[in-house]
Image (cartoon, rainbow, N blue to C red):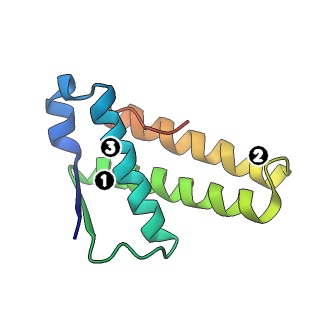
Amino acid sequence: MQNIEIDLEEMKKNEDMLNESFLRMYGNAIEMILKYMFGIPLFGASSSIKGKAVDVKAFAKAIGGEKKYIETAKKYGLNDPKTYKQKSSLTRATSAFEKTTGIKWPFK
């Protein structure tokens, strides 16, 4: 059983934690959450996102944007205008997350 916990406030307090290996773990946690969102069973895993409401909302929009982009790319292909539009929306959501929290989004 894996417990995925992302504490946005703790991440903001400990900027020195945001090194390459930590960002890799952070990216892996987000990847696990995305897999769960796509219905891939994680066998007893749970996840929680902690922080200020505005930060958690920005996180939710960014991860939701990731899901929508993946779904659109899968359905229409990478060169379809719908996919480009969704990528633009995702970029806005992840930029807003970074601006709101000061935490780098691990995927580009």
Q: Is residue 71 left or right of residue 8?
A: right
Which residue is the extreme one toward the right?
80
Residue 32, quarter of picture: bottom left
On the image, the x and y values in percent for residue 36 come to 43, 70
Helix, strand or loop under label 2: helix
Residue 15 sits above or below residue 73 on the image: above
Disc 2 residue type (three-letter) = Tyr
Mark toward the viewer: 3 or 1: 3
Q: Nearer the viewer, mark 2 or mark 1?
A: 2
Labelled disc at residue 77? none
The residue that appears at 63% across and 57% down in the rendered structure is: 70
- Label of residue 56 in the image: 1
Instruction: Answer with mark 3 or mark 1, whichever residue precedes in sequence.
Output: 3
Q: Is residue 18 left or right of residue 108?
A: left
Label 3, secondary structure: give it. Answer: helix
Task: Measure the C-alpha gap from mark 3 to mark 2.
Answer: 26 Å
The residue beneath circle 2 is 84
- Look at the picture and state if 71 lies above or below 97: below
Tell me residue 48's x, y (percent): 24, 62
Q: Nearer the viewer, residue 107 or 50?
A: 107
Residue 39 coordinates in the image, percent (x, y): 49, 76
Position of the N terminus, as image quadrant, is bottom left
Q: Residues within 10 Å of mark 1 (few under 14, many from 20)?
A: many
The number of discs equals 3
Label 1 SS: helix
- Residue at 56 percent across and 40 percent down: it is 92
Amino acid at dot 1: Val
| Three-letter code, disc 3 | Tyr
Q: Position of residue 16 (x, y in %)?
A: 19, 22
Marks 2/1: CA–CA distance: 26 Å
According to the picture, the residue beneath numbered tag 3 turns out to be: 26
State the quadrant of the C terminus: top right
